[in-house]
Amino acid sequence: RFDKDVVLIVNVGSGIYVRRPGFGKGRIVSNVRQLSEVLEALHKEFGKKIPFFVFGYFKMRRGLSCRCNQRVPTHVVLYLGKNHSMDNYVQSLGRGTFNGNSVLESNGYDSVTVLTTKADLEAARAYNEFLDQLYQKIDGGASPNDAIQGLAGKFSAKANFLRSTNRKLGQCNMRDLMDEGAVFQEEDDESNDISLVDDDGDEPFQGDDETKERYWNDKLAQGILRSFTYLFQEDKISKCEAKSIVDMFDSTYQETGEDKV
């Protein structure tokens, strides 16, 4: 139930369904009309006085334009299961980009707000940087296969999307070809370094190059350390109990089919 009137639109393979204010159930509009046409017709009916909520899955992800001449997305909620690839996530995130900032502004917004996981968003930002650098390497004469494996020079730490996600890359999972240590430079921003303090006040990771190197390519260790760091940054007075760290790790980094920590 909604306290305010809204229009609900669901776009799936069987067609486009609409539930207008005051109706308990939605009805199918058509399985041939485009979403933009449906939005246009609904806007003529209701104008800007009530918001539209659009839900979708595969059809929404695959480059479908979720807009009409008077309305563009203002908010995006994006949460994909762990079996979805990194490129699918980035493509889905692209539903919040479009030509027509003037339409967005006319609806009272100056930017699109996205609700998604921190890990996925960090990975998406790094992935876009990775693609830019990959293009430069290929444009410079390297083969795609050599570039992806770091044989044409390492990518910057800023482009290291592997550190934020375990999502596969492409249908054939090209990340299997990528050795993180061989493909990406080490983190050069000291503010992002992870250092833990033990009971005696010592910092075992500070200046301990051997320990850093040992855990650099250990995905399990990296996931646990980042889960701890995220919890600590979110609530500095939190004790970061083991269960909280495990729950954060499982929900962010744990791949389907692997044993839980």
Image (spheres, helix red, strand yellow):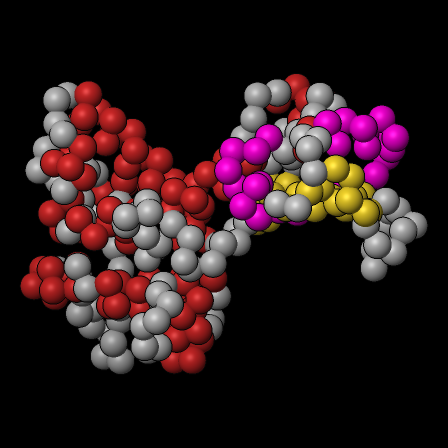
Q: Which one is nearer the viewer's eye here, 18 or 111?
A: 18
- Magenta stretch: residue 144 in it? no
In the displayed structure, does residue 25 sit left or right of residue 120?
A: right
Which residue occupies 21% across, 52% down?
Answer: 176
Which residue occupies 38% across, 50% down?
Answer: 85
Q: Exactly how many numbered labels are in the figure?
A: 0
Which residue occupies 46% across, 38% down?
Answer: 91
Q: Quadrant of residue 250?
A: bottom left
Is 219 rendered above or below residue 26?
below
Q: Can you name the residue that lies furthest to the right here?
A: 22
Asked if residue 224 can be seen in this view, the reply is yes
In the displayed structure, does residue 174 sit left or right of residue 115?
A: left
Q: Which one is nearer the viewer's eye here, 118 or 87?
A: 87
Is 152 rendered above or below residue 199?
above
Coordinates of residue 242 in the picture (x, y in percent):
38, 80
Asked if residue 54 can be seen in this view, the reply is no
Is 235 rendered above or below residue 246?
above
Q: Which portion, as a residue range, is magenta?
A: 37-65
Is 57 rendered above or below residue 229?
above
Split into 4 quadrants, where in the image is the C terminus?
Answer: bottom left
Coordinates of residue 7 in the picture (x, y in percent):
80, 43
Q: Which one is nearer the viewer's eye here, 9 or 120?
A: 9
In the displayed structure, does residue 143 sit left or right of residue 26?
A: left
Which residue occupies 47% across, 62% down?
Answer: 234
In the displayed structure, does residue 195 sit left or right of residue 46?
A: left
Q: Quadrant of residue 67?
A: top right
Split into 4 quadrants, where in the image is the N terminus?
Answer: bottom right
Coordinates of residue 228 in the picture (x, y in percent):
36, 68
- Magenta stretch: residue 58 in it? yes
Coordinates of residue 76 in the picture (x, y in percent):
60, 43
